[in-house]
Amino acid sequence: MNCQLFNLPKKADGRGNLSVIEEFKQVPFKIKRTYWIYDVPGGVERGGHAYRENEEFIVALSGSFDVCVADGKEQKTFSLNRSYYGLYIPKGIWRIMNNFSTNSLALIVSSTNYDEKDYIMDYEEFLQYSTTSNRF
Ligand code: TYD
């Protein structure tokens, strides 16, 4: 599984902390889009899909949540509970986000513009896709 959790730079001084992401540095792709998820009600699950082409880099700017990923062979759960963690998710990965804490804020940077045709919404179709796409 090519998902990877990175420790982002953290500049700490008496005024607080600062972390940073830049394309082709911490983020291993050209950034085309940024969106954020917030005000998630307790117990809600988001995601539940894969992308054919889009890659993502996810940071919990505030609070915490889990990202559960699967590549058709292996499953993993990453707990994003520090503002200096960054999770890279390549294309072709099924992902679910859950366990959002109150007031959590998820930042997602993406390698493509939004395209609903890039989504695989059905898990069976994803499993089929991951075995036939020859990527793993
Ligand atoms: P969706 O991808 O289903 O969110 P999640 O993966 O967190 O469950 O997107 C929710 C809605 O927002 C859906 O109507 C599509 C829209 N949307 C955009 O318009 N642009 C975007 O960049 C994204 C990610 C979603």
Image (cartoon, rainbow, N blue to C red):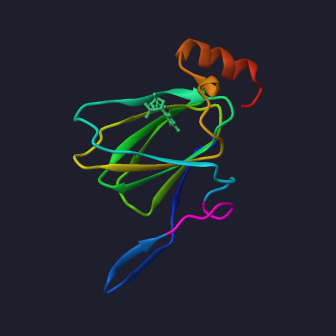
Query: Residue 76: image x %, image y %?
Result: 48, 37
Residue in the foreground of this view, choosing between 32 and 48: 32
- Determine the residue positioned at 28% across, 38% down: 40
Question: Does residue 72 appear in this view?
Answer: no
| Residue 23 higher or lower than 1, as above or below | below
| Residue 70 higher or lower than 20, as above or below | above
- Determine the residue positioned at 64% across, 27% down: 118
Left or right, 13 with respect to 49, comes to: left
Left or right, 119 with respect to 65, comes to: right
Residue in the foreground of this view, choosing between 26 and 106: 106
| Residue 124 higher or lower than 136, as above or below | above
What secondary structure is the magenta-colored segment mainly?
Answer: loop
Left or right, 81 with respect to 20, comes to: left
User: Is residue 100 rendered magenta in the image?
Assistant: no
Q: Quadrant of the C terminus?
A: top right
Q: Residue furthest bottom?
A: 14
Residue in the foreground of this view, choosing between 125 and 40: 40
Question: Does residue 7 appear in this view?
Answer: yes
Query: Residue 4: image x %, image y %?
Result: 57, 50
Query: Residue 128: image x %, image y %?
Result: 66, 14
Q: Quadrant of the N terminus?
A: top right
Q: Which residues are magenta?
A: 20-26
User: Is residue 25 rendered magenta in the image?
Assistant: yes
Q: Residue furthest right?
A: 134
- Determine the residue positioned at 70% across, 19% down: 131
